[in-house]
Amino acid sequence: MAEYEVVREIQNSCSGNQMRDVFFDEIETDDPVGYVKGLLGEMPDELTVEQKDSDNLTVFVSLSGLRQRFLFTRI
């Protein structure tokens, strides 16, 4: 299994507020997209994956009007 550092950013949907909720974690998984789907508990409205290189992956999610970004960096 691969080990990743994960940064989860949840954008604030309130107008005029540019702050984000940011969470950091270290996980082991062979399927980062499956990890995100399992974490959310329900199927997102939109899910996009951007592969930077073999060690970096970004997953963009829209769920119930909230936009989230998960940055996976292999450790």
Image: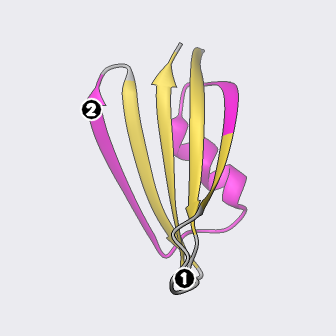
* Residue at screen point 59% across, 68% down: 43
- Residue lying furthest front: 16
* Pointer 2 residue: 52
In which quadrant will I find the N terminus?
top right
Residue in the picture at 70% in, 52% down: 39
Instruction: Kindly identify the residue that appears in the image at 47 percent across and 25 percent down.
Output: 73
Is 40 included in the stretch rendered in magenta? yes
| Mark 1 surroundings: few (<14), some (14-19) or many (≥20) residues within 10 A | few
Image coordinates of residue 74 in percent, x first then y, are: 48, 18
Give residue 50's position: percent from left, percent from top.
30, 44
Colour convention of the picture: secondary structure
| Residue in the picture at 57% in, 39% down | 7
| Camera-side residue of 20 and 65 | 20
For label 2, the SS is: strand
Q: Is residue 35 above or below residue 56?
A: below
Query: The disc labelled 2 sits on which kind of residue?
Result: Lys
Mark on residue 65? 1
Label 2 Cα neighbours within 10 Å, binned few <14 / some 14-19 / many ≥20? few
Whole-percent x and y of residue 11?
54, 66
On screen, residue 4 versus residue 23, left or right, reads: left
Q: On the image, which quarter does residue 56 sit in? A: top left
